[in-house]
Image: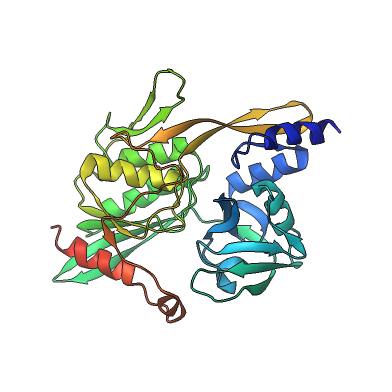
Amino acid sequence: MIYGAISGMVNSLKDPYTVFLDPEDSKKFLEDASGRFEGVGMEVGIRKGTLQVISPIKGTPADQAGLRAGDKILKIDDKTTIEMSIDEAVSYIRGPKGTTVTLTIFRDEWEKTNDFTITRDLIEVPSVEWELKDIGDNKKTAYIKLYQFSEVAGLDFSQVVQEILASPSQTIILDLRNNPGGYLEVAQDISGWFLERGKIVAIEDEGRGKDKIEYKAKGNSRLVNYPLVVLINEGSASGAEILAGALRDNREVKLIGEKSYGKGSVQHLENLSGGSSLKVTVAKWLTPKGASIHEVGLEPDIKVELTQKDFEEKKDPQLDKAIEIVKELR
């Protein structure tokens, strides 16, 4: 009864990111942060009152089923998602490995909904991968795919940096597509590899006449002299938008792809008795130049859409454009 009363009070705020987590949901939240859980493998959010896919995770059942960032989830099994909170949706979508869940999906380019029946599995979310790409004219670029800002992402990224520094790469393509975010501190840490120490990464604005808090780069700036471009799409949210915005504002880095998700609010986690917790929105964050992207997103400097046909034929015109641009940077 107490948990129900608290949930009711929190839900009355009409903020999809302020939620009460009972002990079971708190455990799931911590599992998500660690990057290992059982489910279908995707981040979900609420935009304009509609539950939708923020990003499917590469190689997971959601990704293999063909779900895409921006897909609207209208039903989970036989339950309508109208007025369903994010955490309710997650609790229905998640489940033991080997069981199934059916999602009724609508995509803007479709005329009607489609059902996706997906078998749950053990999800182990990677944090970062990279490869050396030959881009012609005896030039090579480091292509970095940053999946999320999990607990281990900072350490994993530092290892990637050492490998890049030892490689013949002359430029960098940073792929933040379908990166749903994670810990602000990890985004700040990774920003420090690309920015001069002391440069502003993000600004926390609590409003109500309170002083703004500046988060600054603290790293050793080992990648600051590498020309780079950044890939974003509708699945780039939260920490991914912080990093992309910081690189554009401080280094005039070009953003290529599609408009980002627009999750620009800051949540603090308060641990309560009995294993429950409260995740509450306390502020909005701004880019270094003071722009808010909450429910607006970051507009790319070079817009390149990824169509359903591209997706089906495994083509990537966004990455192709990034390679084209990065070749001209050195």
Res 222 seen here? no
Q: Is residue 193 left or right of residue 168?
A: right
**99 lies above or below 202:** below
Q: Quadrant of the N terminus?
A: top right
**Picture coordinates of residue 128 (x, y %)?**
44, 54
**Picture coordinates of residue 83 (x, y %)?**
68, 50
Q: Residue furthest right?
A: 1
The residue at 26%/60% (across/down) is 302
**296 lies above or below 10:** below
The residue at 37%/52% (across/down) is 160
* Colouring mode (rainbow / by chain / secondary structure / one colour): rainbow
251, 330: nearer the viewer: 251
**113 lies above or below 282:** below
329, 317: nearer the viewer: 317
The residue at 76%/26% (across/down) is 273
**Picture coordinates of residue 36 (x, y %)?**
62, 52
**Total marks placed:** 0
Quarter holding residue 14:
top right
Q: Quadrant of the C terminus?
A: bottom left
Q: Is residue 20 left or right of residue 330?
A: right
Res 316 seen here? yes
**Picture coordinates of residue 232 (x, y %)?**
37, 56
169, 237: nearer the viewer: 237
